[in-house]
Every structure is written in structure tokens, then in C-alpha cells.
Image (tube, grey):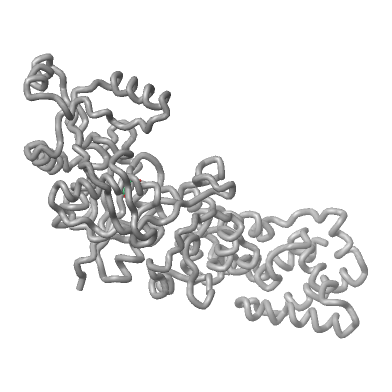
């Protein structure tokens, strides 16, 4: 049974899903799923120039890839839709008319140029560039005069003259002076709703109980609280989590490297790694066990334990986590994900075995082609490795390997392990070191001195090919 906890993730489809936004989505998801609440996906596409449907699609696709699902959103039917802001113009209109009618908002005829000039002057004089209230003070007659001139007004919110207060679940009591806010635009002169206004009208009409978002929205929240109060709606609870920073302490951006979830997907990170990593950035799991799958995260995560300190991106830690998750994931799942990173191998019936054989080497799935290369055509050994098959003992090992293989079945990995163990035993009894036994076989099979464990090589190459490669030397 879902309760009255309703949270939302509200991406703007103006770019691919940023790691920082994915972190916000994750916190909302963990909170909603942990509390039997409802998660709403709202598309904030009010910027007509920069919002694109293709970007919306890619954000939804990446959220699904991360395993973050939602209960209401643009692709579901829900009682509080539509879930794209551009389809909600009528709701914004009704609410702005209400504020106008009650004198809590007023038409503003200032032109962009005038506003820019005032801003410039304020900044030159060292003042906070907030709206100077020119149109707040217009008489009815002055307004009519401007209407007659054909000026199209924006609608500005009349910021009340009292301190703004709200309780943040992470930062505690927050107070803002109205002097730093200034009357702000809620409807632009083209009739479209402004960012702050649409967010509040949506949060109110979608019944949002908790707003969980980044700290960069703290000042917006001061405006939002005023709007909730003016519209007569209950103010939701707020939690502003810390921002994701690059290693140099500035907001994580392209100059720190890849910032978008699909970039990491392309690079071969697993979704469970990203989820795990993003959660750890501001949260320490109890018992200090850091490698957690989604179910464990859900069980252990408590939004109240989030740290307010900035989260600094650490690629080395992400890599470490990915190698751990590569070992934890079921092989069938890995094989499905691995196909696109090694298309030249994915149709091979032994592909699962090949993936398994190189797991210890991988940091990401995009490392696969490099480590799977020894399964390909044998290379002519370089001078550095050729000595392994030229030495007397090396040649004896290879001869023996041919002899055993010619008289054996090679049904699977177990057979191959036994064959290798047998060769090893034989020569180690005669005083050779393990390396002196295994290297000649490896070099004879692949031309290299590094690669997947020998039993895997034997199975994937098959009996015939293995014997023929050994014979060639
Ligand atoms: N659309 C905003 C963003 O992408 C989020 C606004 C909000 O969470 O209130 O930053």
C-alpha cells in the first residue's frame, strides 16, 4: 500500500542525464521505495529553445538502465498528469490569475533592456541586483496607459516584507531576508510560466510531500515557500543534498571528464556500480561494507544519514567498485551487457566462458576486446617470449601437451583443467617450476606470455585448433 509520501524527480531535458541529477534521482528513489511512497517523474521542459524530446527519451532510458523506476510520469497514466510542464499551461494560468486577482502578483511592463540597465547600475553601485519595484507601485491609470501602448506585461510576484523561513531536513533552520529575493517573475511576457512558479504549482497540485534536490536550489526554495503560502497550499518538507564536485572542488563539469550517465554506460560501467557509487558519495553505510547491490542499498540507506558535506567525484573509487561489481553480477547478466563491447566475440558459443576467464582483469566492460584478444589468431611470438618455446624443456612441455591432447576428450572446462594439471604435475615432478610448464603452452597457443587461464584457452580454441597451434612450433 502506498502512503501519502510523494516525491519527484524533475529533470530538464536540456542535456543528457548528468551524474549529479542521477544522484538526485537515486535519493528520491531510495526514499520513495524505502518508505512505500510514490515517485513521480516530471519533465521540466519550459525552456522551448533548449528542451528536446530526444533528450527526454534519453534521460528516461538512462534512468531505466540504472534500475530507477517511477510510479507516475510522462509514460504512465497517473491521476496528477500531465507530467510534462509544457502540457500544463492551463494549470499555471489559473494559478497566476488567482495571485493577480488577490493582489499577490502584479503586471510588470519593464522591458528587458530596462531591466538589464537597472541590473548593471545596481551591480556598479555594489547592490544586489533585485527588481526595484517600478511596476509594483503603478496606479490603475498608469497600468491602463501601458496596456493602451500595447505593452505585453510579465507577471511578478509581490514578495511579502517578512523574513522567509523553512526547515531543511539536512541543513536545519533556513532563513532568508526578502531583500535578497526581490519581486520575481512568475509568468513571462509571452504568457509562459517561469521556472519557480511552475515548480511550485506542480509540486502543490501533484501532492508532493518531500522535495529532495540539490543545494543549488536553496535560494529558489525561499521563493517557493512564499509561493506555496500565497497560493494557500501546504509547504512540503525540503531536503537539499550536497552537490557533486570535481576533484578541484568546483561543480562537476565537462572539464573534469565525463559527466553524463550515458558516457559511463558507453565506457562499460555497470548500472549497479553507478548506483552504489552515487549513494556512497554522501553516505557511509553501517558496518562499513561499501560494495552494495540495489537491494542492500535499499535496506540500509536512510536519507537522514546523508552528509551535508560536498561530494567529490573520485574516478579511482568508481573503477574499484566496478571491478567488484563485475565479480558480483550473475554471469548471464554480464554476458548480456558485454556483447556490445566485444561484438566480434559475442556470437561465439563460448562467449560466457571467455567473459568469465578475464573477469579478474577488467575494470570496465570496454576492456574486454583487449583481454579477449588471445582467443583470436595466434601471433608470432616476439623475441622476448619466444625463448619459452625454444628451450629444450619448453619444447618437451609442448610435445607432451600435444600427446595428452591427442588422446583426450575436451568436453569442457573441467576436462581442460585436468589436462593442464596433468602436464604441470608431470614436469614439476621433474623439477620445473609451474611457470616453466605453463608459459611454453601459453606462448605456443597464443604467441603471448599473458592471457586468460590455459584451461579456458583450450576450451575456446577447441581440441583441433589447440593441437594445430602447438604443432606449428
Ligand atoms: N528541473 C530542475 C533541474 O533540472 C529541478 C528543479 C527541482 O527539483 O525543483 O535542476
- Across the whole image, how many numbered discs are drawn on residues? 0
Residue 423 percent coordinates (x, y)? 79, 79
Above or below, comparing residue 185 to residue 10 in the picture = above
Name the quadrant containing residue 26.
bottom left
Above or below, comparing residue 189 to residue 357 in the picture = above
Q: Residue at x 76, y 82 (%)?
A: 422
The residue furthest bottom is 429
Q: Residue at x 17, y 32 (%)?
A: 155
Task: Between residue 342 and residue 53, name the one nearer to us.
Answer: 53
Task: Between residue 64 and residue 115, name the one nearer to us.
Answer: 115
Above or below, comparing residue 308 to residue 59 in the picture = below
Task: Between residue 377 and residue 246, name the one nearer to us.
Answer: 246
Residue 194 percent coordinates (x, y)? 24, 37
Q: Is residue 77 left or right of residue 124?
A: left
Name the quadrant containing residue 196.
top left
Residue 240 percent coordinates (x, y)? 37, 55
Q: Is residue 256 left or right of residue 149?
A: right
Residue 134 percent coordinates (x, y)? 22, 25
Q: Residue at x 89, y 61 (%)?
A: 387
Question: From the image, which quarter does the C terminus lie in?
Answer: bottom right
Asked if one can make out residue 190 in the rendered structure from this viewpoint, the answer is no
The residue furthest right is 392
Question: From the image, which quarter does the N terminus lie in?
Answer: bottom left
Asked if one can make out residue 373 in the rendered structure from this viewpoint, the answer is yes
Amino acid at each position: 500500500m502506498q502512503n501519502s509520501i510523494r516525491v519527484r524527480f524533475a529533470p530538464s531535458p536540456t542535456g543528457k542525464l548528468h551524474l549529479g541529477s542521477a544522484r538526485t534521482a537515486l535519493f528520491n528513489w531510495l526514499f520513495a521505495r524505502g518508505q512505500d511512497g510514490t515517485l513521480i517523474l516530471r519533465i521540466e521542459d519550459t525552456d522551448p529553445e533548449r528542451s528536446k524530446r530526444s533528450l527526454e527519451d534519453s534521460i528516461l532510458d538512462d534512468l531505466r538502465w540504472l534500475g530507477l523506476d517511477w510510479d507516475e510520469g510522462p509514460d504512465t497514466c497517473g491521476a496528477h498528469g500531465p507530467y510534462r510542464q509544457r502540457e500544463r499551461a492551463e494549470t499555471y494560468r489559473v494559478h497566476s490569475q488567482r495571485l493577480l486577482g488577490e493582489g499577490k502578483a502584479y503586471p510588470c511592463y519593464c522591458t528587458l533592456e530596462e531591466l538589464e540597465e537597472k541590473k548593471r547600475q545596481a551591480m556598479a553601485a555594489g547592490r544586489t541586483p533585485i527588481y526595484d519595484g517600478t511596476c509594483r507601485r503603478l496606479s490603475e491609470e498608469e497600468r491602463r496607459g501601458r496596456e493602451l501602448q500595447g505593452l505585453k506585461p510579465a507577471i511578478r510576484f509581490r514578495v511579502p516584507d517578512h523574513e522567509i523561513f523553512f526547515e531543511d531536513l539536512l541543513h536545519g533552520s533556513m532563513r532568508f531576508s526578502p531583500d535578497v529575493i526581490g519581486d520575481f517573475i512568475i509568468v513571462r511576457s509571452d504568457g509562459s510560466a517561469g521556472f519557480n512558479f511552475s515548480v511550485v504549482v506542480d509540486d502543490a497540485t501533484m501532492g508532493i510531500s518531500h522535495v529532495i534536490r540539490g543545494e543549488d536550489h536553496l535560494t529558489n526554495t525561499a521563493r517557493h515557500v512564499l509561493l506555496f503560502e500565497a497560493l494557500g497550499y501546504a509547504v512540503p518538507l525540503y531536503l537539499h543534498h550536497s552537490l557533486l564536485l570535481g576533484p578541484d572542488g568546483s561543480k562537476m563539469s565537462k572539464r573534469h571528464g565525463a559527466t553524463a550517465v550515458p558516457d559511463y554506460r558507453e565506457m562499460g560501467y555497470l548500472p549497479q556500480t553507478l548506483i552504489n557509487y552515487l549513494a556512497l558519495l554522501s553516505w557511509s553505510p553501517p558496518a562499513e561494507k561499501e560494495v552494495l547491490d540495489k537491494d542492500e542499498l535499499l535496506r540500509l540507506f536512510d536519507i537522514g544519514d546523508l552528509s551535508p558535506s560536498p561530494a567529490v567525484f573520485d574516478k579511482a573509487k568508481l573503477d574499484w567498485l566496478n571491478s567488484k561489481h563485475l565479480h558480483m553480477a550473475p554471469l548471464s547478466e554480464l554476458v548480456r551487457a558485454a556483447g556490445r563491447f566485444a561484438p566480434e566475440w559475442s556470437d561465439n558459443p563460448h562467449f560466457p566462458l571467455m567473459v568469465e576467464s578475464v573477469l579478474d582483469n577488467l575494470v570496465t566492460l570496454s576492456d574486454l576486446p583487449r583481454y579477449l584478444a588471445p582467443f583470436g589468431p595466434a601471433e608470432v611470438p616476439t623475441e622476448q617470449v619466444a625463448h619459452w618455446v625454444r628451450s629444450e624443456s619448453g619444447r618437451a612441455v609442448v610435445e607432451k601437451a600435444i600427446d595428452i591432447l591427442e588422446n583426450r576428450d575436451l568436453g569442457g572446462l573441467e576436462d581442460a583443467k585436468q589436462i593442464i594439471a596433468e602436464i604441470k604435475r608431470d614436469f614439476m615432478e621433474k623439477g620445473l617450476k609451474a611457470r616453466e610448464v605453463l608459459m611454453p603452452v601459453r606462448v605456443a597457443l597464443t604467441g603471448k606470455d599473458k592471457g586468460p587461464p590455459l584451461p579456458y584457452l583450450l576450451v575456446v580454441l577447441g581440441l583441433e585448433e589447440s593441437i594445430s597451434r602447438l604443432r606449428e612450433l
